[in-house]
Image (cartoon, rainbow, N blue to C red):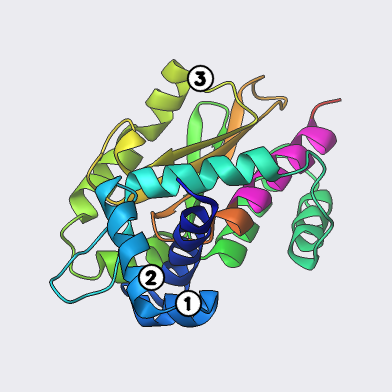
Amino acid sequence: MTVRQQNILSAIVEQFAEVASPVGSSLMAKLFNVSSATIRAEMAELERLGFITQPHTSAGRIPTDKGYRYYVNAIVENTQPVLPERRAEKALASRVQSAGAPERMIRNAVDTLVELTHNLGLATIGNQLYMSGLSNLFGQPEFVGGAHVQQVAQLLDNLEPWLREAAPNEPLSVYIGAENPIGRTAGVTLIISRFRSPFSDRSYIGTLGPTRQSYRDVMGLVARAGQELEEVLYV
């Protein structure tokens, strides 16, 4: 993939996250200051490679799971280990540190992720899975019709035992669309951070949202939540 194709893919991912509708060549042409014909040729190549798709005839393009994975891998490769102290991350730290009891700290972290990302938030507390923000998840345009709701519910029903069995060991793990263990066609992304707590050396906090989301922001917030919880809970 050329540098320009990488940049076009990134722009499609970010624009689609913002507007929730397929991204057309005319908008990309304005962003990159080239002709629409040039953009159409580049988008055709990205589609041939499997990074984007055209959901309807004469419509713009949207990213595929493969396109999202390429984009997320680029974020991981280019993100510094120490995240900047942005306003949202300061709010997250404040809510965690003021909570008192360990269980309340984790619940506050989840509730804050829900407010900041507009996704469903979740965390393991001992052998239980705490979730908040179901209305956020099912209020997204992708799920208004209800076609994928059953698959999402099945994923949530089985998430806690899967986490216990699979025990993802990365500080931050991202499961996009078909990469999810259950509900592979539900069109959701699970972003989880592992942290150590009094409950377990492998506790998890994260979000579940549509594949169309602001990955850079959500990944940063989930990573910060895990770091913050480990710093205050694991002593």
Where does label 1 land, which residue? 34
Where does label 3 land, which residue? 167
Give the overall secondary structure of the magenta segment: helix
Where does label 2 land, which residue? 38
Disc 1 marks a residue whose amino acid type is Val
Numbered disc 1: secondary structure = loop
Contact check, label 1 and label 2, Cβ < 8 Å: yes
Image-based side of 58 in relation to 155, left or right: left
The range drawn in magenta is 219-233
Numbered disc in front, either 3 or 2: 2
| Mark 2 burial class by Cα count in 10 Å: few <14, some 14-19, many 20+ | few
Residue 122 seen in the current view: no
Cα separation, mark 3 vs mark 2, equals 46 Å
Identified at 24% across, 70% down, the residue is 144
Coordinates of residue 73 in the picture (x, y in percent) = 54, 40
Report the front residue among 134 and 23.
23
First in sequence: mark 3 vs mark 1: 1
Identified at 28% across, 73% down, the residue is 60
Report the front residue among 24 and 43.
43
Whether residue 55 is situated above or below residue 29 in the rendered picture: above
Asked if residue 227 is among those painted magenta in the image, a careful observer would answer yes
Report the front residue among 7 and 130.
7
Disc 2 marks a residue whose amino acid type is Thr
Numbered disc in front, either 3 or 1: 1
Residue 16 seen in the current view: yes
First in sequence: mark 3 vs mark 2: 2
